[in-house]
Image (tube, rainbow, N blue to C red):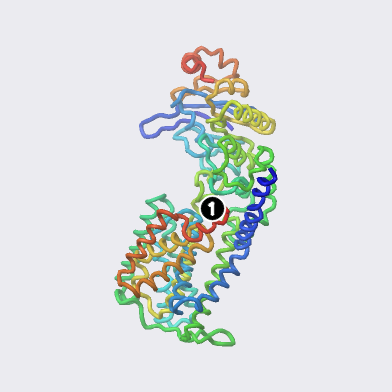
Amino acid sequence: MSVIRNAELVPAPARRSFAALFSNVSRWRVPLSILALCILPWVLPSQALAVNVLIYGLVAVGYNLLFGYTGLLSFGHAAFFGAGAYATGIAIGAFGVHWFIAMLIGVLVSGLLATVMGMLAIRTRGIYFSMVTLALAQLVYYAALQASSWTGGENGLRGFTVSTLHLPGFSVNFLDPLVKYYAIMIVVAGALWFVSRVLNSPFGAVIEAIRENETRARACGYDVERTKLLSFILSGILCGLAGTLSAMHLSIVPLDSLHYHTSGLIVMMTLLGGAGSFFGPFIGALAFLSMEDIFSLWTSNWQLIVGVIFILFVLYLPKGIWGTLISWGKSR
Amino acid sequence: MSVTNIGKQFGGLVALKDVTADFREGQITAIIGPNGAGKSTFFNILSGALKPSSGTLRFRGADMAGVPQHDYVHRGIARSYQITNIFPNLSVLENVRVAAQAFRSRMNIWADRSADRDSEDRASAMLASVGLSARAATPAKFLAHGQQRALEIAIALVADPALLLLDEPTAGMGPEETREMVALIEKLAAQRTILLVEHKMKMILGLSDRVLVLHHGQMLADGTPKEIQANSEVRRVYLGQNDGYA
């Protein structure tokens, strides 16, 4: 009897420490993310890859607010990423605006676009919602293709370069890859802190309730449409912010950033890392871009390998990398 | 709550026709009727999920015609669902807390939700009163069926509604769980008006102050359980053919 009791006692502290570990990770999620981002350029094979992880990680985090937390599968988030990038590029290139104002303009334009697209898409549900977002994003793509005097059409937007970030009192050399990485990281860290606050807020509780059961959330007294729209706009703004960073980083805006391939990429990264979790999207972006980096050295058909891995994940680990780790930790 | 000449059509199908009723405060009213009698439609209209095609719905003197469904609970009308309608992946406590939060904060993206002690305290107290305190941290989907039904009612009750609409509160329950639910409803009835749709005849006759019988979308009878049992029309369309339908 005492043997059995002892045997039962052994795993208990282990279980407690795992649960404690995960609740601590959750409490310190913003500082931990920033710490991880600080060492990222030193562990990845190239700084270019690290900057891409930052930018696409932010896109996926923004997308996750809508998809993972509100439960709305948008296939049109490239529109906000692209709109932010184009607006910033045009503001700098055509109007010679200060980089910071240009970033604000990029965020504002993507926010306005998200408001319009959101108001139209949120009237529909399920697969129709996905299709409407896809169609509206394609509309934006073709608009950018046609308005070539503003956007450069198929060649993408060129002719703007940010080489120095002028700040009150000092300037930052934006051509130095490492300096550039950390400058972008500060913006991304701010965005992560913002998202963390939103998720912890009463609004964050409401979007999860809507994801879980829209009918009941409405019966509980929540204006589901308004809440969804706000989530859509916040999500669009975050993707737009990533777009402005991408424009400043690359000094060009490829037309492809508006293409539905980009929208698909965002969905894939989010799913791969784990939708509906704080770290998931960033981990997904890191995993996806690292795979691209490694496999594209071996073969030009690297997408084939990534595709197979993605299918395996959807079939066997639908919670994604981080989601699987969490449930594994909780079940211990 | 009073309804006057309520009608509802779905395309060519007339689901409800000229239903008029007045629900007095503090009473338990049951709505019965054979399948397809229009009970669910009536219930959905009372809870704001459907808008009537004709007629008026008034609550505490106010016309409810232009009121969106999500405002019903803020006016004092809450409902439970026949099919358990909870937030499956949220914890049991969070299920009730988020319902309580609707009265404090709905669109605030910046505050810390754990700073809203009031909603959490109300949710905890509600869980205690339906006997779910021990399961507070469990994801709701892992509860047993009877416990999910209790949670379902707790979500509606935390709104402290003046009028509580219960859609088959004992659906799928065994005799023991049904007895517990009846006791809970009787306890609740002391403080509020309750309207319920049910199939279990014995339970209705023992529990309600008043019974409405719907048949083919029309009001067939309205009276005390005794009057309804004695009504030959009701016996013909409903009670007789369902004898033994406990």
Residue A310 visible in image: yes
Question: Label 1 neighbourhood size at 10 Å, few (<14), some (14-19), many (20+)?
Answer: many
Q: Is residue A73 left or right of residue A152?
A: right
Rendered location of residue A274, percent (x, y): 48, 59
User: Foreground residue, B34 or A92?
Assistant: B34
Residue B123 seen anywhere in this rendered image of the structure: no
Does residue A181 sit above or below B165 in this rendering?
below
Pinpoint the chain carrying mark 1: A
Q: Report x, y in % for residue A195.
A: 55, 64
Which x, y percent locates residue B118? 69, 50
**Which is more toward the observer, A174 or A299?**
A299
| Drawn side of residue A322 relative to residue A250, left or right | right
Number of marks in the image? 1
**Up/down of A173 relative to B136, above or below:** below
Residue at label 1? A208
Residue A60 locus on image (x, y percent): 46, 65
Q: Residue at x 55, y 67 (%)?
A: A192
Q: Amino acid at mark 1?
A: Glu
> Which of the two residues, A147 or A294, is positioned nearer the viewer here?
A294
Name which residue lies at 64% across and 42% down. B158
Residue A248 found in image quarter: bottom left
**Helix, strand or loop for disc 1:** helix
Please identify the quadrant where the C terminus of chain B is shown: top right
Say which quadrant the N terminus of chain B sits in.
top right
Q: Quadrant of residue A308?
A: bottom left
Please determine whether, in this image, residue B65 is positioned above or below residue A92: above
